[in-house]
């Protein structure tokens, strides 16, 4: 069963995915090659989430049914490394990553909260998987942050 509260929550997370995708695309433009690649991948991943949440919203509104969510794997990082000295704006790069970490943490919690509220097994599983994917983005960003901070090398 769909309730206005569930649809409202879905619209909020959908908008959050749109904003995250745009922010990551914008951040990619300011970073050196490897950081650029990471944020392009994150932007594309959040766009994928946006499209799936949009499909869910449509299905719930038209049929009252949850959709099957197959999930998505994050691509492997490139094998080359770029020294932080080659990153023209290291301080702002760390800030970009910090802001991205906050977005991912918020998204993870939002999906976990939705999963806790949904009794439909397919819907519950979808929100759990989305929460797990956001947590994986958080871990990837945290590895990049620590690597840049500790070794001066982009690595995730």
Image (cartoon, rainbow, N blue to C red):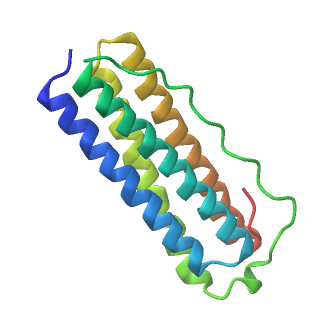
Quarter of the figure that contains the C terminus: bottom right
Residue that lies at the very extreme toward the left in this rendered image: 4
Residue visible at 43% across and 48% down in the picture: 105
> In the rendered view, would you say 88 is above or below 33?
below
Nearest the camera: 95 or 53? Answer: 53
> In the rendered view, would you say 126 is above or below 150?
above
Residue visible at 24% across and 24% down in the picture: 62
Residue 21 percent location from the top left of the image? 46, 58
Residue that lies at the very extreme toward the bottom in this rendered image: 88
Nearest the camera: 22 or 118? Answer: 22
Q: Is residue 154 visible?
A: yes
Relative to 73, 6 lies left or right: left
Residue visible at 77% across and 71% down in the picture: 153
Nearest the camera: 13 or 83? Answer: 13
Find residue 123 and report its image quarter: top left
> In the rendered view, would you say 120 is above or below 138?
above
Q: Is residue 99 visible?
A: no
Residue 152 percent location from the top left of the image? 75, 74
Relative to 75, 134 lies left or right: left
Find residue 11 and report its image quarter: top left
Relative to 77, 103 lies left or right: left
Residue visible at 87% across and 59% down in the picture: 79
In this figure, what is the number of numbered marks?
Answer: 0
Quarter of the figure that contains the N terminus: top left
Residue 54 percent location from the top left of the image? 36, 39
């Amino acid at each position: 069963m769909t309730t206005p509260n569930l649809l409202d929550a879905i619209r909020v997370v959908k908008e959050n995915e749109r904003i995250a995708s745009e922010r990551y695309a914008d951040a990619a433009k300011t970073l050196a090659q490897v950081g650029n690649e990471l944020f392009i991948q994150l932007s594309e991943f959040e766009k994928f989430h946006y499209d799936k949440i949009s499909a869910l919203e449509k299905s719930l509104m038209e049929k009252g049914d949850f959709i099957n969510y197959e999930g998505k794997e994050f691509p492997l990082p490139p094998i080359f490394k770029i020294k932080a000295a080659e990153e023209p704006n290291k301080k702002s790069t760390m800030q970009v990553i910090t802001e991205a970490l906050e977005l991912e943490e918020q998204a993870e919690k939002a999906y976990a909260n939705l999963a806790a509220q949904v009794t439909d097994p397919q819907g519950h599983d979808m929100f759990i998987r989305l929460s797990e994917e956001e947590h994986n983005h958080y871990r990837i960003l945290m590895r990049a942050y620590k690597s840049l901070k500790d070794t001066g090398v982009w690595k995730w």
